[in-house]
Image (cartoon, rainbow, N blue to C red):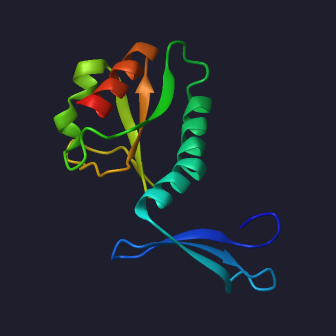
Amino acid sequence: MIRAGRRVGVITYRDGRFELILSKASDPDSCAASIPLSPEEANTLAGLLGAPQLVAHLREETRGISGITTRQLPVTAFANHTLGETALRTRTGASIVAVVRSGNAHPSPGPDFIFENGDLAVVVGTAEGLDAAAEILHGG
């Protein structure tokens, strides 16, 4: 619900389609506008709205801890592979604490979590660990 009393949302259909909706001002349960989104557009919107808020919350939670940083990183090299295959924690000391996919956060993904194109990994670690994690998630 936005300040104007309207609802804004993204509908994810089981067949993979996405739709951005805006409710009527007079009735927040009725749709005034609907815009079809491609998966890439839905992911961009998720990044604009969801991932930064999650990262901001994590930054706030770790503010008093020296040397810990949070960053959202695109996962391009491991689409259709599991988190365990990255060996990210072993290789960098950084941890993936959530994955944002199409506007939905998947907290605490396990080693069997399968990445998809467009995923954003929310990673916590040292600055050096995050730089190394970015290289791995982008380049393999």
Q: Residue at x 54, y 13 (%)?
A: 66
Quadrant holding the N terminus: bottom right
Q: Residue at x 40, y 22 (%)?
A: 130
- Tell me: 37 left or right of 5: left
Q: How many marks?
A: 0
Quadrant holding the C terminus: top left
Rendered image quadrant of residue 101: bottom left
Residue 102's place in the image compared with 19, above or below, is above
Q: Residue at x 60, y 69 (%)?
A: 9
Residue 128's place in the image compared with 137, above or below, is above
Q: Position of residue 129 (x, y in %)?
A: 37, 18
Residue 93's place in the image compared with 37, above or below, is above
- Tell me: 65 left or right of 102: right
Of 102 and 91, the residue lying toward us: 102
- Tell me: 11 left or right of 63: left
Rendered image quadrant of residue 128: top left
Rendered image quadrant of residue 54: top right
Q: Position of residue 10 (x, y in %)?
A: 54, 68
Residue 108's place in the image compared with 130, above or below, is below
- Tell me: 123 left or right of 44: left
Q: Position of residue 98 (x, y in %)?
A: 41, 43
Q: Residue at x 60, y 78 (%)?
A: 34
Of 38 and 83, the residue lying toward us: 38
